[in-house]
């Protein structure tokens, strides 16, 4: 199975500009690129697919260039938007560019990373209009989905010109690096093909360059890939902790797990088929979710961080809280009810304050019925005091009622 055939099997191919790319990728080792605008100081899971597809090409011997859109990020991509983006300052764009470059290199450490601000800033208005603008037909630009979908609500000249600015990337990399392929999501088709047209007009009709896209990735319910009820799942561990990142994948619904297994893991096709069969025969074992969570957490955050996320999950399931470090407590109990105290507090009162009990009578009942644990140890003493001396790392006491209800005391 060649690369294009495998991408089709994995549901990672939506459209190509030229069927010849199948043989080119099979018989040559070419340079390709994918881009991301630094609209925030972190990428999120929705961006991750770009670098997973890039890794598949790299694993077949092709050479990735990862473009950070320090220049295009100042303009704003209208694709997939119903309204104008807020314009970023140059300072913010460059700061964001630096942050996401580090994230990208975690996933593809051997890739070449460039920032399109470096060549876009060299253009003045006259040169841009004469040397680049003359190659673009307004009628063709209006027909692009990213523009056409915005005409009713209005689109500024700034965002209208985005496809021209992005086209410069492909031309620049074609001329500098002999980069002959651009890849991207389905919603980028208009921007990508505009770059291909610019290369042919500047370099001549014999210029051989290609593009392909993958489908927009959505979950079975139609919601956007990489989103949760709380918003985006970020690659920056300070925005989305490693444990939360791991849990996003481990909690994938069964109906999404098989498609994710094909798209985002790096097992061979044969291995993937075997795991799909195993998963379908025993879905309760959740082998698909576990494999996805392992591969992606290791890829983005490293093996040690993955193992820490697994420890947190196991401790929460088993109640062996003392096995966790202070940092793991912070990650694993980030969103549970909490209470900060400066002195010791009766356990009965603590249960009420963190809403694990509604009254002192109920709190006492839970304690005497062996339903309350403190740092993983059952407590039946109604006079028990929660204090810093018994806290994990001198900072945290974890309260548990029953099997699943947790609360955190911060000392």
Image (tube, grey):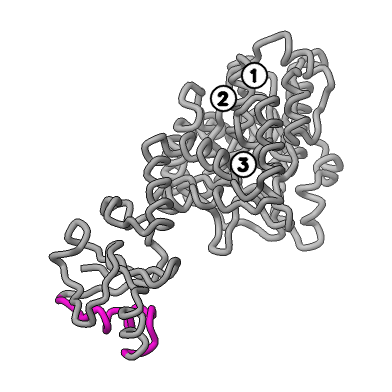
Q: Earlier in the sequence, mark 3 or mark 2?
A: 2
Q: Earlier in the sequence, mark 2 or mark 1?
A: 2
Q: Is residue 410 above or below residue 221?
A: below
Q: Give the secondary structure at mark 1.
A: strand
| Residue 60 on image: x %, y % | 63, 17
Q: Which residues are magenta?
A: 343-360
Judging by the rendered image, the residue that carries numbered circle 3 is: 288
Label 2 CA crowd tier, 10 Å (few <14, some 14–19, many 20+): many
Q: Give the secondary structure at mark 3.
A: helix
| Residue 91 on image: x %, y % | 42, 46
| Rendered-image quadrant of the N terminus | top right
Q: Residue at x 72, y 45 (%)?
A: 216
Give me the C-alpha separation between circle 3 and circle 2.
31 Å
Give me the C-alpha separation between circle 1 and circle 3.
36 Å
Front-lying residue, 207 or 38: 38
Q: Give the secondary structure at mark 2.
A: strand
| Residue 405 on image: x %, y % | 42, 70
User: Residue 140 sits in which quadrant?
Assistant: top right
* Residue 228 visible to an observer of this rendering: yes
Q: Is residue 406 left or right of residue 144?
A: left
């Amino acid at each position: 199975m060649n690369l294009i055939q495998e991408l089709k099997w994995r549901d990672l191919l939506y459209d190509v500009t030229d069927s010849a790319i199948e043989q080119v990728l099979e018989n040559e080792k070419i340079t390709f690129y994918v881009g991301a605008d630094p609209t925030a100081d972190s990428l999120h899971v929705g961006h991750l697919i770009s670098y997973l597809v890039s890794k598949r090409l790299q694993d077949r011997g092709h050479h990735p260039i990862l473009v950070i859109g320090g220049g295009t990020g100042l303009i704003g991509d209208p694709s997939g938007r119903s309204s104008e983006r807020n314009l970023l300052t140059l300072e913010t764009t460059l700061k964001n560019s630096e942050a996401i470059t580090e994230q990208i290199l975690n996933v593809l450490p051997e890739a070449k990373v460039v920032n399109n601000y470096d060549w876009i800033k060299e253009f003045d208005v006259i040169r841009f209009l004469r040397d680049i603008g003359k190659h673009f037909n307004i009628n063709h630009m209006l027909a692009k989905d990213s523009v056409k979908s915005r005409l009713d609500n209005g689109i500024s000249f700034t965002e209208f010109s985005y496809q021209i600015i992005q086209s410069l990337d492909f031309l620049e990399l074609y001329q500098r690096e002999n980069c002959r392929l651009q890849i991207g999501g389905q919603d980028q088709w208009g921007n990508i093909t505009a770059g291909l047209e610019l290369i042919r007009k500047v370099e001549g009709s014999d210029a051989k360059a290609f593009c392909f896209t993958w489908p927009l990735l959505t979950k079975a319910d139609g919601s956007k890939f990489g989103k949760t009820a709380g918003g985006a799942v970020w690659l920056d561990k300070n925005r989305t902790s490693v444990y939360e990142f791991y849990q996003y994948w481990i909690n994938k619904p069964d109906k999404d797990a098989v498609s994710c297994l094909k798209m985002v893991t790096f097992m061979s096709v044969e291995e993937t088929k075997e795991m799909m069969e195993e998963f379908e025969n025993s879905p309760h074992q959740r082998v698909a979710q576990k494999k996805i969570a392992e591969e992606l957490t290791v890829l983005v955050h490293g093996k040690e961080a993955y193992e820490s996320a697994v420890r947190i999950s196991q401790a929460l399931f088993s109640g062996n809280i003392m096995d966790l470090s202070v940092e793991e407590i912070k990650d694993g109990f980030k969103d549970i009810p909490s209470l900060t105290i400066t002195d010791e507090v009766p356990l009965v009162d603590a249960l009420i304050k963190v809403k694990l009990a509604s009254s002192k009578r109920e709190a006492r009942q839970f304690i005497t019925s062996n339903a309350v644990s403190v740092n993983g140890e059952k407590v039946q003493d109604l006079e028990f005091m929660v204090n810093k001396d018994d806290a994990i790392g001198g900072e945290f006491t974890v309260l548990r009622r029953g099997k699943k209800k947790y609360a955190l005391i911060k000392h």
